[in-house]
Image (spheres, grey):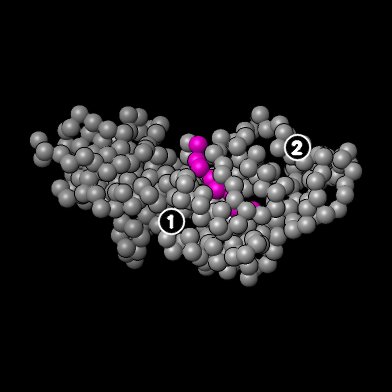
Amino acid sequence: MAPKFLAIHLDGKVICPNETFLNPRGHVALCCRRTIRNISKQNSFVDCSESRTKARVAMTTPNILVVEDDRETRALIAKYLRNHACNVTTATDGREMARAMTDHRVDLLILDVMLPGEDGLSLCRKVRAESQVPIIMLTARGEDVDRILGLEMGADDYLPKPFNPRELLARINAVLRRQAAAQTVSAINGATALTFAGWRIDFRLRELRNPAGARVAMTSAEFDLLRVFCERSGRVLSRNSLLDLTQGGNAGSFERSIDVLVSRIRRKIEADPQDSVMIKTVRSGGYLFTPTVEAAVPANGPS
């Protein structure tokens, strides 16, 4: 028998509080639309147990601003996110949103399209003109043209109603991770040297030094590949993309050459090359460089 789930339907229809519905995925569903009535079972939505797979956000206690004119929907989103380690501020329209963004640091903006006064698309465009804060658009209209308009206005993601609250949290995680990665790349793009796990790679001198400060000999191809890994830490890179980034898609290059170079680099930077920790092999994906990479503090010079 298919598992049951509690449906919280916020579409102006009175639903028996004890009514259950069948869903093959067994998800708790939040159905958010324009005309909403108070339903006594709404608390069951936010109180459902997720102790076995408790979701976490991508950064420590992010500050999230929820701009949604419907009181029930706004309260449900805010409570759910607060239960998952988020600081949440709410607003009902563009004026309240502007005040909140002035008074508080905002790490991510959840913006409904259908707002009184200035709509969400217009507000998204204004925010993006002045700030790079991540924006997730919410709307009861799920047509492709609406999603395209939202993304063209500068939104980072777009979630149509009704939606599963866990999907909203997952999208928040994904957007915050992308932003963190972009900030890291921005910080290191202008750096002449980077550090990872105690190691230091110097682009100007084209040298690698171990945690003890000793220089480690590398071929030019090995150095170029390690640089690509450092500049894209935390991202799965396919062999083809690594070839393009290191050799410019040279017609004479082949994927196996990347495997050979990775093996050589592992022997130089890994404590156990047979059980690699820093350069992980991703099955059917390529490679993942796992260390946290930071711009290096200027050194006094080579020893």
Secondary structure beneath dot 2 equals helix
Q: Nearer the viewer, residue 129 or 167?
A: 129
Magenta: predominant secondary structure element? strand
Mark identifier at residue 132: 1
In the image, is 303 to the left or to the right of 198?
left
Residue name at image x 59 percent, y 50 percent: 91
In the image, is 274 to the left or to the right of 120?
left
Task: Give percent across and percent down for residue 147.
Answer: 61, 65
Q: Is residue 67 magenta?
A: yes
Q: CA distance from mark 2 to mark 1?
A: 34 Å
Residue name at image x 46 percent, y 61 percent: 128
Quarter placement of the C terminus:
top left
Q: Nearer the viewer, residue 225 or 114?
A: 114
Mark identifier at residue 43: 2
In the image, is 15 to the left or to the right of 110?
right
Residue 60 in sight:
yes
Residue name at image x 33 percent, y 52 percent: 186
Q: Which amino acid is tagged 1?
A: Gln
Name the quadrant containing residue 95.
bottom right
Task: Give percent across and percent down for residue 43.
Answer: 75, 37
Q: Which amino acid is tagged 2?
A: Asn
Relative vertical location of residue 134 with respect to residue 17 in this rendering, above or below: below
| Highlighted range, magenta | 61-68
In the image, is 168 to the left or to the right of 46?
left
Residue name at image x 80 percent, y 46 percent: 38
Task: Give percent across and percent down for residue 106.
Answer: 48, 47
Residues packed near mark 1 inside 10 Å, few (<14), some (14 to 19) or many (20 plus): some
Q: Nearer the viewer, residue 224 or 107?
A: 107
